[in-house]
Amino acid sequence: MSLFVKDPQARIDHAIDWSAYLAAQTLIASDWAVSPEEAGGVIVEATAFEAQRSSARLSGGVVGRLYRLTNHVILSDGQVDERSVTIRVEER
């Protein structure tokens, strides 16, 4: 799991490049979730995906808190996978 630092005022895209895990498959669906869900916490504003890459635009967050950002994908051959990263919110 990777660790990223985010300013609470930043609105920034985070992406996962799935190409190393896919062989001949492609992404056909992508969903993002943040945990914990809380007032003022990190939220997913928008999402996008291509054949081998998915992204989420994040905003908000409580200074000093850690959040788990998880990308759940469905592959063209029906397999399901997910990857998570940790987001630490700090004034920058």
Image: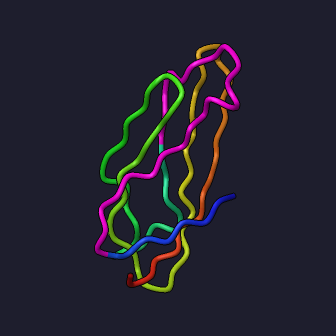
User: Left or right: 46 with respect to 42?
Assistant: left
Residue at horizontal 31%, vertical 46%? Answer: 46
Vertical relation: 43 (above or below) 26:
below
Rendered position, 69 above or below 56:
below
Nearest to the observer: residue 41 or residue 22: 22
User: Toward which corner of the image does residue 18 lie, by quadrant?
Assistant: top right
Residue at (57% x, 63% y) in the render = 68
Q: Position of residue 53 (x, y in %)?
A: 50, 33
Q: How is the image coloured?
A: rainbow
Indicate the position of residue 11 as horizontal and vertical percent values: 30, 62
29 or 2: nearer the viewer: 2
Say which quadrant the C terminus sits in.
bottom left
Question: Residue 76's spot in the image, x, y percent?
Answer: 59, 15
| Above or below, comparing residue 14 to residue 88 in the picture | above
Which quarter of the rendered picture does the N terminus lie within? bottom right
Q: Is residue 27 magenta?
A: yes
With respect to residue 26, does 72 lie above or below? below
Q: Quadrant of residue 80?
A: top right
Region rendered in magenta: 9-31
Position of residue 86 in the picture relative to residue 30 (left or right): right
Residue 15: % across, % down: 48, 46
Give the residue drawn at x 33%, y 70%: 60
Q: Identify which residue, 27 or 5, lies in the foreground.
A: 5
Residue at left 46%, top 77%? 89
Q: How many marks?
A: 0
